[in-house]
Amino acid sequence: MVKIENIQHASDSLWEKCERCSEFEFMQTLVRNSYLCQYCGHYYDMPALSRLKQIFQNKFEKITLPLENDILICSGEGTIFGSQVVLIAISRIGELQIEHLDSFLITIQYAIAVQMPLIVISSGMNHSKSKISLSYITQIAIEMNSHKQMNLLQISVLTDGNMTDSLSTLFPLGDLTLVEWETEDNRPTTPSDAFVDHYVRRHEVPVLIGQLLSWSSDNK
Ligand SMILES: [Zn+2]
């Protein structure tokens, strides 16, 4: 079910335009900087595969999904600071189709089978485009619940704090919710949103997940 692959970046374009400041950024620079705009500090939406590479620092085993090398959804198994986890990265979650949700379900079932914590990283919530049916939402919630019953940690990472409300209607956000926050200057010290446990800068996400996993296993 699992195989190792050399990952190539999926995008063909050399330049990407920042949706906030409209500056153009060289694609290779963006990839190197975890999709952070060097002009305004905005976090670009990351392709799913790039996200896996960022969190696992390039060392992981890709979980085989029905949509292979899909830009929107990708799953892998690997180690984050000593803890083994299953991770699913979802880019532009509002554009997911039924086939993507099969991939989501397979990943949760895989995490149950190997009895590992599950990390779900989502970006790009846009309800107007979403084609996610209620029956699928229910199935995902049931699988997430089965995973939780095994006393395995579930962590959600969102690229935008505004997503918590709409996303929590689609699937359970798990035990802990981290939201990526761009700059140190205006980051709230305590989350004002009840769904959010921590705000974190993108390059610090792997460290924070590692700390939370190790804290959780010490407290079992
Ligand atoms: Zn920018």
Image (cartoon, helix red, strand yellow):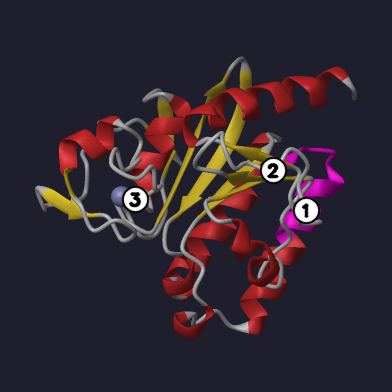
Q: CA distance from mark 3 to mark 2?
A: 27 Å
Characterize the local packing of mark 3: few (<14), some (14-19) or many (20 or more) Cα atoms within 10 angstroms.
many
Span highlighted in magenta in the image: 143-155
Question: Residue 119 placed where, x, y %?
Answer: 61, 42
The C terminus appears in which quarter of the rendering? Answer: top right
Residue 181 forms part of the magenta stretch? no
Q: In this rendering, is residue 100 above or below 1? A: below
In the image, 113 versus 92, the foreground residue is 92
Residue 148 forms part of the magenta stretch? yes
> Which element carries disc 2, helix, strand or loop?
loop
Q: In this rendering, is residue 44 above or below 127? A: above
Q: Amino acid at mark 3?
A: Pro
Residue assigned mark 3:
47
| Mark in the foreground, 3 or 1 | 1
Is residue 126 toward the left or the right of residue 43 in the image?
right
Residue assigned mark 1:
192
Tell me the quarter of the picture where residue 138 sits: bottom right
Question: Residue 206 placed where, x, y %?
Answer: 55, 27
Q: Amino acid at mark 1?
A: Ser
- The residue at 76%/47% (across/down) is 191
Q: Which mark is residue 15?
A: none
Question: Residue 163 placed where, x, y %?
Answer: 60, 64
Residue assigned mark 2:
188
Looking at the image, do the residues carrying marks 1 and 2 touch, with CB atoms under 8 Å apart? yes
Residue 7 in sight in this render: no
- The residue at 61%/31% (across/down) is 85
Characterize the local packing of mark 1: few (<14), some (14-19) or many (20 or more) Cα atoms within 10 angstroms.
few
Is residue 112 toward the left or the right of residue 18 in the image?
right
Q: CA distance from mark 1 to mark 2?
A: 8 Å
Q: CA distance from mark 3 to mark 1?
A: 29 Å
Upstream in the sequence, badge 3 or badge 1?
3
